[in-house]
Structures are given as structure tokens and as C-alpha cells.
Amino acid sequence: MKKFVFSFVLLIFTAFLVKAQDAAQPKPVNSNAPEISFEKTVHDYGTIVQGANGTCNFRFTNTGKEPLILSRPQSSCGCTVPSWPQEPILPGKSDTIKVTYNTNNVGGTR
């Protein structure tokens, strides 16, 4: 019985060890993939009044080797709305994502 239990434990240990080695293998990276690089990633509006222009442009460049396609950029909250280029951005080319901040509700209630 001891041999059976020892063999079973050894089998389970070996299975976990093999699985851990598979997980440690790095995933292959596509060296030709598109890559986006922003000039800035944060915009500080400072003190802004209700109803003011809340538009900001975030300029980016495709620093990868294949065309970059933006499918659905998202903002971190519902008060900002992004608009982006619909056509692919070729390698080395730049464009902008326009973000509009709704300033109508600045300062809480009206």
C-alpha cells in the first residue's frame, strides 16, 4: 500500500512539474506587429468652467512594422468620448485620437 501511495503522489507531483514548465515558456512575440507610441498619455485641463471646450488631441505614431488598426479605443469614464481614425495607420505614420470631455456637468449639479 505504501508503494501505491508513494507512486500516486510521485505521479501527481510530476504532472504538476511538467505543467509548470509549460506555463513558464514565453509566448512567441510577433516582431512585425504594429506598435502604438503616444506623444502624451495624460492631459490636465487645470481649472475648467462649465460649458468650456473640453477637446484634446492625443497624437500617436505607429512605430511597428505592420499597419495599425484602432478598433475601439475606450476612455476611463463616461464623461470623455474618443474619436479615432478609421483607416489603418501605416508604419512610421502618425495620427490623432480626439477626446472630448463633457464640461456641461463640471462642478456637480446645475
Image (cartoon, helix red, strand yellow):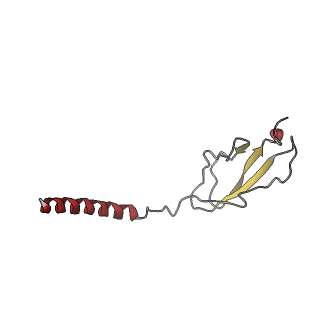
Residue in front for this viewpoint, 62 or 22: 22
Give percent across and percent down for residue 105. Answer: 81, 39
Residue depicted at 83% across the width and 42% down the height: 107
Q: Position of residue 3 (x, y in %)?
A: 13, 63
Which residue is the extreme one toward the top? 110
Task: Answer left or right for 3 relative to 82.
Answer: left
Location of residue 91 (image quadrant): bottom right
Foreground residue among 47 and 24: 47
> Which residue is situated farthest in the left direction here?
1
Position of the C terminus, as image quadrant, is top right
- Residue at screen point 71% across, 57% down: 41
Q: Residue at x 57, y 61 (%)?
A: 65
Total numbered badges shown on the rendered structure: 0
Instruction: Please state, as top left, top right, bottom left or bottom right, where the N terminus lies in the image.
Output: bottom left
Comparing 8 with 48, the one in front is 8
Residue at 88% x, 45% y: name it: 49
Residue placed most toward the observer, 98 or 80? 80
Task: Judge from the rendering whether residue 13 lies leftward or rightward of residue 101; answer left or right.
Answer: left
Q: Is residue 45 left or right of residue 86?
A: right
User: Residue 76 in the image: x percent, y percent?
Assistant: 67, 47
The image quadrant that residue 94 belongs to is bottom right
